[in-house]
């Protein structure tokens, strides 16, 4: 195994880095950015481009535990202790680690020191602010499957902004009063309460969206009760037409979570509460 793969380094192509930098500037607004840091720079995919066309006030400082370019400072970013600075942006392609745990550490450390984060992340984080919730997710973009260090990886670009009231203390579960969701999980012997009446059911693991013919037909199912007749038809239409794999860019062993159903309903239906 090569050192870069062993350290979970998958370097970003120039084309993808350019696209991500431009999108970040467009979404945040370049005048709102006062300082730029690339926290896990590797060979400087982002910092070299930024420093190539930016003025000094927008220059990018790059760090890496094992730098591969002379412009990069040798430093374990997770041990870097900088005072918070308004307008500071962290941008790049952090190492993901198992179950995205290492990327989460980079994110949460960046939260302490700046206002904006723009990271390339695994596609599981597309439109997903459940793990990285301290900042508001203001843009999520599917980057498709592209080569990183010669390995095809399906990634997304997520851009985050510090909330006006500080940081979010917990993830948004997108709760709604207009629907109630109960889950059936055969592996846990978890089934519906006998008195629970529902209006819609779907498989939430494997054959996403497929309607079970009976409770427990699939390993994991969701049963949805509609509590507001005023939006009943819209909810049913939304659920019937949802392509969950496309909405959340799922790949192997796709699994749909409650918050994802609620978020899609909330994003799609005006007036749902």
Image (cartoon, rainbow, N blue to C red):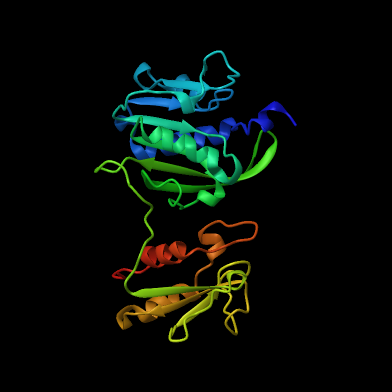
Residue ID at (39%, 74%): 180
1 or 147: which is nearer to us? 1
Residue at screen point 41% across, 79% down: 225
219 is higher (above) or lower (below) than 213: above
**Foreground residue, 188 or 38?**
188
Q: The C terminus lies in which quarter of the figure? A: bottom left
| Image quadrant assignment for residue 31 | top left
Residue 25: tell me if it is visible: no
Q: Residue 254 vs residue 194: left or right?
A: right
Question: In the visual, does 100 lie left or right of 198?
Answer: right
Q: Residue at x 62, y 56 (%)?
A: 251
Residue at 39 percent of width and 42 percent of height: 160
- Above or below for 238 versus 214: above
Which quadrant of the figure has residue 261?
bottom left
Q: Tell me, yes or no, if residue 70 can be seen here.
A: yes
In the rendered image, residue 187, in percent from the top left (x then y), is placed at 62, 69
Residue 241 in the image: state x and y as whole percent: 49, 73
Residue 237 in percent (x, y) is at 44, 77
Toward which corner of the image does residue 203 lie, by quadrant?
A: bottom right
17 up-or-down from 262: above or below = above
């Amino acid at each position: 195994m090569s050192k870069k793969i062993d350290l979970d380094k998958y370097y970003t192509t120039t084309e993808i880095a350019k696209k991500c930098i431009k999108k970040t500037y467009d979404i945040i607004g370049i005048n709102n950015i006062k300082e730029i840091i690339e926290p896990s720079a590797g060979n400087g995919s982002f910092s070299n481009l930024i420093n190539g066309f930016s003025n000094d006030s927008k220059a990018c400082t790059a760090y890496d535990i094992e730098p591969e370019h002379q412009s990069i400072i040798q430093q374990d970013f997770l041990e870097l202790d900088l005072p918070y600075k308004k307008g500071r942006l962290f941008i790049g392609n952090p190492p993901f680690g198992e179950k995205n745990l290492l990327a989460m550490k980079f994110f949460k450390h960046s939260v302490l020191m700046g206002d904006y984060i723009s990271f390339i992340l695994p596609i599981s984080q597309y439109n997903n602010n459940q793990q990285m919730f301290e900042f508001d997710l203001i843009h999520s973009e599917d980057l498709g499957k592209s080569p990183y260090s010669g390995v095809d990886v399906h990634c997304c670009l997520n851009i985050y902004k510090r909330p006006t009231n500080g940081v979010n203390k917990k993830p948004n579960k997108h709760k709604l009063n207009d629907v109630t969701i109960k889950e059936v999980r055969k592996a846990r012997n978890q089934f519906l309460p006998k008195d629970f009446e529902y209006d819609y059911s779907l498989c939430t693991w494997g054959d996403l969206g497929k309607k079970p013919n009976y409770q427990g037909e699939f390993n994991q199912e969701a049963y949805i009760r509609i509590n507001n007749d005023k939006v009943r038809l819209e909810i049913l239409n939304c659920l019937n037409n949802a392509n969950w794999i496309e909405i959340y860019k799922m790949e192997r062993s796709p699994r749909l979570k409650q918050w994802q159903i609620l978020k899609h309903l909330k994003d799609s239906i005006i007036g749902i509460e």
